[in-house]
Image (cartoon, rainbow, N blue to C red):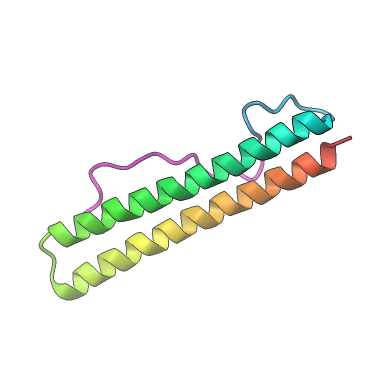
Amino acid sequence: SAACFSLSVLAADPTTTLPSDPGGALTSQEARDLKTQNKADYKAHKKVAEANKDLEIADCKTAGLGAKDERDCKYDAKQSAKAVKKDAKEVFKDNKAGIKDRTQ
């Protein structure tokens, strides 16, 4: 059974820029601020993925599934979290490269 409660994760879009991004060339202070925000965003997405995985695994355990179905359910939850983390890392890397390219 799918998790009844799920924390929403922003869709990973490689062109995503950070909300406070002023656009254009960046001063070193602006770049530093954006790097800090980028890292915090990345860590938050990872934690949300872990929380969702834990919720899905709990649902698997309480759904009254057979042993194999429960194992498959847990495996799917772990794979889903892994994919979300991978997407978050890609966005983090893209943002990091974008910040570096625009720093004066």
Asked if residue 88 lies left or right of residue 5, the reply is right
User: For this view, does 23 lie left or right of residue 67?
Assistant: right
Q: Quadrant of residue 59?
A: bottom left
Check the image and report above or below for 85 versus 102.
below
Residue 79, by quadrant, is: bottom left
Residue beneath the point at 44% across and 48% down: 47
- Residue lying at 17% horizontally and 61% vertically, measured from the top left: 61
Q: Residue at x 69, y 39 (%)?
A: 35
Residue 78 makes an appearance in the image: yes
Is residue 69 highlighted in magenta?
Answer: no
Q: Give the total number of marks visible in the rendering.
A: 0
The residue sitting at the bottom extreme is 68
Residue span colored magenta: 1-15
Question: Chief secondary structure of the magenta span?
Answer: loop
Q: Position of residue 26 (x, y in %)?
A: 82, 30
Quadrant of the image occupied by residue 16: top right
Q: Quadrant of the C terminus?
A: top right
Residue 4 drawn in magenta? yes
Report the residue that reaches farthest toward the right: 104
Nearer to me, 14 or 44: 44
The image position of residue 22, as x and y in percent, is 73, 24
Residue 43: x %, y % from top left: 52, 46
**Residue pushed farthest left?**
64
Residue 49 shown left or right of residue 63 in the figure:
right
Quadrant of the image containing the N terminus: bottom left
Q: Position of residue 98 (x, y in %)?
A: 76, 42
Q: Could one spot residue 16 in this view of the protein? A: no
Residue at x 65%, y 26% (from the top left corner) = 20
Q: Nearer the viewer, residue 82 or 26?
A: 26
